[in-house]
Amino acid sequence: MVKSRVWDYFLKLQDGRNKCNLCNKILARGSRGSTHNLISHLTRVHPKEYVLQEEPPVMIAQEDSSEFSFQSNNMKTEDFTMQSFFEPEFMKLYNDNNITKSIMEMICMDSMPMTTTDRAGFKRFMTSVCPDYELKSPSSMISYELPKLYQEYEDQLRMELNLAEHVVLSVDIWSDKGSIQEMIGVTGNFLKNEKVVRRTIGVINYQKDVHNGVYVAAELDNLMARFNLNGKVEVVCRDYNSIVENACDHLKISSVNCFNQQLHLAACEAKSKIGQINRVLLNCKLLVKNLKNSSVTWQTSEKIQSLMEIPNLCLNHCSDECWCFLQEFFGRVIECQQVIEELQKLQSSDWDLMRDVVEILAPLSKFSKLSESKESSASVIIPYCDYLVKAYESTQNQPEAFLAVKEHMERELHKYTSCQYLKFSTLLDPRYKDLYTNDSDTSNLIKAIETEFETMDYKNRTFEEISSELCGPAPKSQKLDFDAYIQEKIKSRGKHNALTGEKLTVRMEVTRYLSTAVEDVTPRDFWLNDVTKASYPRLAKFARRFIICPTGSSAAEKLFSTDRATMDEYRNTLSDENLKMLIFLNKNISSMTDLEFETERDLHD
């Protein structure tokens, strides 16, 4: 085993203590031969003579030997055996920073309290896996390690956004039960390595005393400037909030209502039009309660369900707070009707009303789940909304409830179709194309593409061309050169022909795309495909900004489920700044590192 370089600075005494060769100070003997106190003395008292190297050594196999040597570029070459690699002082020398960072990431990802590092169980665990690691205090973790980790991931996110061409933001306002604390969550969708990724951009403190869109607009503008997003944001997905809408109008950014929230509002309006629904729901809850209170009755119901091949325990969950839970609960009750009729009777009108509720809410529940799927984009909003308007046009039962849903979705369809971003998104969806748009929308799409490529052509011009346009042509000589005059005419005509040819190419690509048959493929898979890029180079480049938009602001809403887990009754002393950093890291660590820890639920949230 090779001697540690710590002993170059110390002399072992007969009583087991160690004498520093630099200052003659006597240090106590470390437990189990540990040199931690010796290294600590050198780094504190003699930093110039002894410098800790953070760069890990490179392991090199030696010829004709079963051992390895380790070389470091920023320290003098030393040979280590495999046994010495796992010595405590070697592990501490190279892993302290990584261990501290990993602990801080664990605390942020799992919403653990900062006092975790001060708890007996965690200390015991760290002692068993890394006995020479010195745990940081909770105050050190929150004062130093948390801002350090936040800065690291913020810089990484800024680099990602600098490379992104287009970004779509999701914004949501949240407040706690007593409206004591209010915040605005902001997430962003963009393309990275030809895949749509989602990142948490930040959380903004919402001041109730400044309750207007101008304040929210200023805060959003500061956040976008912090990440260099000015000019990159295509559209903002927001909840049904006039303040955020006014803020987007103030910033001159197009905004879209969350589609899933509109389905929720339509369902609530339908529920309010159905008479006796609360009475029937109460009867069903009492029925389930009576069945579960009697062990004999419940066992009998289980046997009947088994004989009829009905899923067991399908009456366990019910809620009148959310319409989708209500629809599922009534559906389970109807599924178990034969079992219930054997044990306890319900009125026929109650069964009819439950079937009506399921019929009314089923389409809304279906499209709510479809719109929240991972592959859904904003291009489905207009087709889904149009279908729901048609689906609720005529009914024999509960006409007022059906009419309420139809009128609500008609109002929203009018708003959605007035948004140019959504119309272009639908037009560029290979499953729909021009089924929900008209010739005017197609013409506007062509003009938008032409304008973009004209701007790109302007950016690509030489300095001499731009100077000539801004300052005028260079002064002509008194003698006119006929050959130079002809060459100038040819050059001017070439520019005109090139511009005309570019516009013609754009029109041909759009016409060819719309003339082909619709395809059952998502816009992301279609426009990011290499074959599509080769077939429609200009159209594919323009379409990239329309495939990154989600159907709503659920991603921003999910930030506040983290807020409730982070700011619980036992951690109510967290400052606003620390809370924002914890939420940012909780959502971004797993998605921004090489190892993806996102669960299926996170991907669909």
Image (cartoon, rainbow, N blue to C red):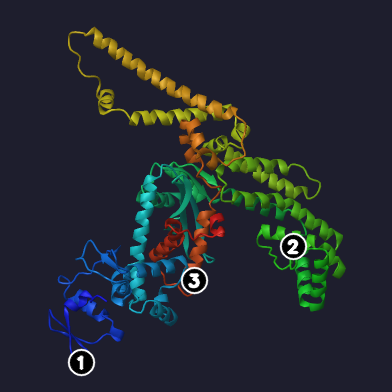
| Earlier-in-chain disc, 2 versus 1 | 1
Q: Which of marks 1 and 3 is in front?
A: 1
Q: Residue at 28% of width from left, 82% of height from top?
A: 34
- Split into 4 quadrants, where in the image is the N terminus? bottom left
For marks 2 and 3, give the CA distance.
Answer: 33 Å
**Disc 2 on helix, strand or loop?**
helix
For marks 2 and 1, give the CA distance.
Answer: 84 Å
For marks 1 and 3, give the CA distance.
Answer: 53 Å
Residue 254 rendering spot, x and y as whole percentages: 48, 41
Q: Is residue 351 left or right of residue 471?
A: right
Q: Residue at 16% of width from left, 78% of height from top?
A: 9
Marks 1/3 in contact by CB < 8 Å: the verdict is no
Residue 392 occupies which quadrant of the picture?
top right
- Work out whether residue 603 or residue 1 is closer to the camera in this orientation and state it: 1
Residue type at numbered disc 1: Asp
Q: In this view, does 30 lie to the left or right of 204?
A: left
Residue 367 rendering spot, x and y as whole percentages: 65, 49
Residue underneath mark 1: 15
* Label ID, residue 278: 2
- The correct choice, above or below, for 392 with respect to 593 in the image is above
**Disc 1 on helix, strand or loop?**
loop
- Split into 4 quadrants, where in the image is the C terminus? bottom right
Residue underneath mark 3: 568
Q: Which residue lies furthest to the front in this view?
A: 64
Q: Nearer the viewer, mark 2 or mark 3?
A: 3
